[in-house]
Amino acid sequence: MWPLGCSRPFKILNTTNILSRGFNRMFSQCRRCLHECPQLGVMDDLQVLNLQHNLITGISQLSLLRHLVVLNLDDNHITDMSGIQALTSLRILTLATNRIHQISCLDNLAKLHILDLHHNQISKMENLSHLTELQVLNLAGNNISRVENLLGLDSLMELNLRHNYISFVAEVDLLPRLRRLFLSCNNISSLHQLGCCGESLSLSELTLDGNPVALETWYKQAVLRCVLHLRQLDMKRITVSLITLFQVFLCGWYAVQNETSVLYNEPSHLNNVTSQYSFQIQTPENSPAHCPTQTNGLAQEPSLTEAGSVTSLSLSDNHLAELDGDTLRLFGLGALDVLERGWGAQTASAVTVIAFRYIHFDAIVPMLPRIRVKFPNLHLIFLETNISRLPQLAALAQVRRLDQLTIHQQGNPVVGLALWRSFVIYRLHHFNLQRINSQEVTMNDVIAAERIFGTLGHVAATETPHCRLLLLLEESRKRQLQFLLEGRGRRAGLSPEELRDNGKLVGEGLSRALFNYPSRDGSTDKASERTATVDLYLQDLVRQASETNVKGEALHCLWPAMFAEMVRDCVLEMSDRAKSTGDQVYQDHSR
């Protein structure tokens, strides 16, 4: 292992490697608790000096070592670099894990190839532009906030800036030979802060993990769009599946939203991107050593149709369908056509996961009956499918069996509703769901869902007239309802399929079946007409409710006066009645 922040161990500092390079004068004093550098004036031809893991605070005592090529002062107490300028032959300088605040005193070290200053207290990149032969620069674990002052480092091939506070990157495109750039664990929150990386023609490896921008779901695809020549991202090779996913990222959302965009209307640009990556994809089957179609030592470009266990079923400018083991991934509206194809029983039974992305859920609903027929058991995944209402989730009852359900919050507003999970558990109770969004469904969840929606379903099932039920339920449900209403069981002439369909509602429950979501196969005119009718009906209800409320408020204001007047009238009436009664009694007595 090597210190945190190093991209890899500097093998050139290993004794055996150094000797193999012809360094025959070495001196090592590691872990000796030295407080200052030893006096080595008599060893003026010394080439390699190793003083790591001591308590050294200064370097000035080494100024006489004019032939020193490798100097290792890692893990000491050095606070400044004064005295290093006299070592004009240095090729490798490591001052990692010290207390250095500023990069300085490197003016005469024009031959320097490797400079390691990781885990110090450096806050600015400076005094480096004259190091024209520098190939590796390690400044990981410091306090640097900007990548700057790189002009002149024409030989730099690797720049390690992990574990800093960087929020802005500049001048990377001015490094003609830079291949590896490590920016993990910094404060980069937007790809706009990395604009210069896209201009670099030599950059092939980039790490951005641990930055806020890496938390975005579109992060990898956006980086590939900006930096076209990458072979590795976050220490992982760029694969065929990642490239095709990048293509879908560029064109898939356009397929869903049907918006015009310059970015999404450039299929030729996508093809160029694919061709840029084609040389990076090597498998045992298409490597030059195994490829039967190689010509002049160069293998043919691999096809995007198949890579390892990933099989591309359909690919165009606006959709992608691929089969990865037991997972069928569908990106873009056009990918739904794959479900219409003839699937062999063995292949269909092997598919246990179907993932939808960049497809409107209303377009998926008509395909659910086909999924029911072809795929027996499933884990459905929805991402960017615009599921926004609870009734949409009821459409999932059309599949044959559902063990797991995953609805990502991204692009599905329904996940933001507090009761969405309870509704799914209640509505799809007959499936006996095991997990929802990777969270296990417990008996307590089932009981809670029944308490919330069970009463509502019971009221809907018992209070709705039978004729209205027949209108609300879909065709398959009408037969089931009629079966229950007539109280019929097994009869002669009833096919096994009908018996199975009729009996299914008993498991699903009529109250649950009323929470349905009809397919949107109807014409646009009829849908708009229904919408207009509903709007008028709602407006009339709102008007009536408003008028009733106004009348109620008026009555509330007038009631005190009305009540007082009513009481006064009653008192006067009683008074008049008592007086007339007394007069009548007096007259009767006089007679």
Image: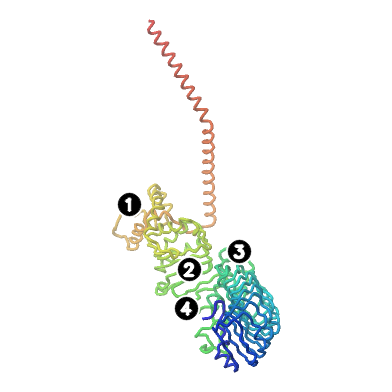
Residue at which label 3 appears: 259
Whether tag 2 and tag 1 are in contact, CB under 8 A, the answer is no
The kind of residue tagged 1 is Glu
Q: For the residues marked 1 and 4, what is the alpha-carbon distance in whole angstroms?
A: 53 Å
Quick one: label 2 or label 1, which is nearer the N terminus? 2
Camera-nearest residue between 153 and 549: 153
The kind of residue tagged 2 is Ala
Q: Is residue 366 above or below residue 102?
A: above
Q: For the residues marked 3 and 2, what is the alpha-carbon distance in whole angstroms?
A: 23 Å
Quick one: label 3 or label 2, which is nearer the N terminus? 3
The kind of residue tagged 3 is Glu
State the mark number for residue 309: 4
Q: Secondary structure at mark 4?
A: loop
Q: Is residue 212 above or below residue 133?
A: above
- Please state which of the two labelled residues, at mark 1 or mark 4, is closer to the viewer: 4
Q: For the residues marked 4 and 2, what is the alpha-carbon distance in whole angstroms?
A: 17 Å
The kind of residue tagged 4 is Ser
State the mark number for residue 355: 2
Quadrant in the rendering for residue 257:
bottom right
Quick one: label 4 or label 3, which is nearer the N terminus? 3
Quick one: label 3 or label 1, which is nearer the N terminus? 3
Query: Mark 3 packing: few (<14 Cα in 10 Å), some, or many (20+)?
Result: few
Q: For the residues marked 2 and 1, what is the alpha-carbon distance in whole angstroms?
A: 41 Å
Q: Is residue 435 above or below residue 325?
A: above
Q: Is residue 243 above or below residue 67?
A: above
Determine the residue positioned at 34% across, 51% down. Answer: 485
Can you give x and y, in whole percent of width and height, for residue 579 in the image? 44, 14
Can you give x and y, in whole percent of width and height, for residue 399 in the image? 42, 64
Q: For the residues marked 3 and 1, what is the alpha-carbon distance in whole angstroms?
A: 52 Å
Quadrant in the rendering for residue 30:
bottom right
Q: Is residue 191 left or right of residue 356?
A: right
State the mark number for residue 486: 1
